[in-house]
Amino acid sequence: MIAHMLSSKLDRVVVDTNVLAGALIGRAGSNRWVIRACLEGRLKPLIGQALFLEYEDVLSRKGLYRSSPLSPAERRELFAAFLSVCEWVQIYFSWRPNLPDESDNHILELAVAGGAAAIITNNIRDFHAAELKFPGLRVVTPRELAQEHQ
């Protein structure tokens, strides 16, 4: 049912920054599966101004990528490829779901504005604590999503 729900919405998803960073740090795993699924057109990632700036900020943290199998140039190339498959979404209304981490509110707002079927994050606990709920919008970990699609 979950895979069907994603398929019925053209696999529109919001990929949280921790998933992108995790994919760039590790050699394999579910974070990489998510990015690969986006690059292969199996998922349609949505992006907005706040998420783009957050991606850029995290990607500029050199110490974070010490154990990355990718060189800085390869990380930039992968990021550019990822951006090329993203759909830009303009957010016209701030819902303010009052997540425990205020800096995550823009992720939920992007998902609602873009009609996403899911938010993919390694931090589901904070998203489940939202005061404002949106039926039909799932919050899943990369591992859960990868398992659903296998």
Image: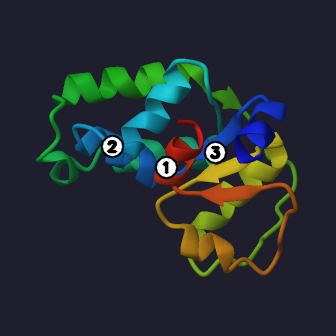
Q: Residue 77: x and y, percent?
A: 33, 20
Q: Residue 116: x and y, percent?
A: 76, 43
Left/right of residue 56 with respect to residue 14 in the rendered view = left
- 144 and 105: which is toward the camera: 144
- 60 and 129: which is toward the camera: 129
Residue 24's image quarter? Answer: top left
Give the labeled residue for mark 3: 14
- Which label's residue is closer to the chain start, 3 or 1? 3
Left/right of residue 137 with respect to residue 84 in the rendered view = right
**Which residue appears at 53% of the width and 53% of the height?**
144
The residues bearing labels 2 and 3 have C-alpha atoms spaced at a distance of 18 Å
| Contact between labelled residues 2 and 1, with CB atoms less than 8 Å apart | yes
Colour theme: rainbow
- Image disc number at residue 29: 2
Residue 138's image quarter? Answer: bottom right
Q: Amino acid at mark 3?
A: Val
Residue 33's image quarter? Answer: top left
Give the labeled residue for mark 1: 142
**Which residue appears at 21% of the width and 53% of the height?**
64
